Image: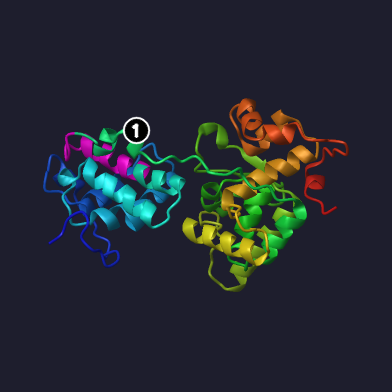
Amino acid sequence: MSGPGSPAFGPPPSVKVENTAGLVGSTSTTLRELRDAFADWSASKASDLAPSTRSLYLTRLDAHALRILVRSTRASEIGTPHLRTMIDTLRNENASGASVRGVVTATSAMFKYAVRRGIVPVNPVRLLERGDRPSGKRQSEPRYLDRKQIDKLLAELGDDYRPIAATLAFAGLRVSEALALRWRDVDLNGGMLRVQGTKTASSNAPVPVIEPRAVELRRHRSRLAAKGLHLTRSDTFVFTQQRRNVLRAVYRAGEAAGLNPEGIERIGCHDLRHSCAGLLFAAGMSPPTVAAILRHADTRTTLTNYAGLVESDRADLRRDLDAAFAIR
């Protein structure tokens, strides 16, 4: 017997929905069918989802939401009790508040699509009480690494993950942005990256490539070419790793490098972006300049997130971006 709470034994083979129009108004549509129809729609021109957001939503649906709610369950049967069970299950699995909230957001996006298709009358996620929704707020302050600590972390990462971590630390990208990069977005001669698949339009802007980052990219491209994988064409992704595996690799590297003292939250991917901002401010760069590098739409966002750094001592400030990452 299947239904919410039934055991799941791993993801079944992907089911291709050949004609999603047949799902319109169908109350017998299963979560698996709904997920596949949502995947097809979100890849079409009708969708306003960025490719990286679509990929993240599908990953969260496959790894968590459909696993717990059970793929064969009818979408029309899902109500707030099932969603509360899903949230409780994730919490019992020690998922962070941000991770749980991310799964809920992906589930809501799928059911929002189901409402438009007439598969369900209302999005059940919208019926959750405020107290039911997990907080995405981090429970501790972000971690900031200096240049020597960044180098120690990178030294513990292998060839598959070190270039990604270097992109986060030396270019200030979000992990979703790094994984959305294609070789056509990389101009090593001009020293610029074009950031695609970003959170907002203002985030979709070129960022400078300083030498430590350029070195890692050149080595990464050479390794791929040496393997004969033909992955360096302009339309191929620079990195092919899964987001969750990148985070796990950074966690392991932080432990190996001795950067995670007991009682302090582990170094994660976003901490590398924070560290980039910290080094830029320490180099004496103005908030508007740092905001431009981080691609914040409003300088106030930069000041709000990094106010403590702005107020720090700037006795020996340097204005050159490369100098910000030089080992002292």
Q: Residue at x 72, y 36 (%)?
A: 309
Question: Between 173 and 128, which is closer to the camera in this rendering?
Answer: 128
Residue under numbered circle 1: 130
Residue 114 in magenta stretch: yes
46, above or below 70, in the image: above
Residue 54 location in percent, x, y? 39, 46
Residue 210 location in percent, x, y? 74, 49
* Badge 1: residue crowd in 10 Å (few <14, some 14–19, many ≥20): few
Q: Which residues are magenta?
A: 105-121
315, above or below 61, in the image: above
Residue 295 location in percent, x, y? 61, 35
Question: Between 201 and 300, which is closer to the camera in this rendering?
Answer: 300
Check disc 1 and report its element: helix, strand or loop.
Answer: helix
Residue 204 as seen in the image, left or right of residue 17: right
Residue 29 as seen in the image, left or right of residue 291: left
Helix, strand or loop for the magenta stretch, by majority:
helix
Q: Residue at x 17, y 55 (%)?
A: 3
Query: Residue 292 appears in which quarter of the rendering?
Result: top right
Residue 198 in magenta stretch: no
Residue 68 location in percent, x, y? 28, 56
285, above or below 82, in the image: above
Residue 201 as seen in the image, left or right of residue 315: left
Instruction: Indicate the amino acid at tag 1.
Output: Arg
Query: Residue 281 appears in which quarter of the rendering?
Result: top right
> Does residue 183 appear in the picture of this structure?
yes
Q: Residue at x 21, y 52 (%)?
A: 33
> Does residue 242 appear in the picture of this structure?
no
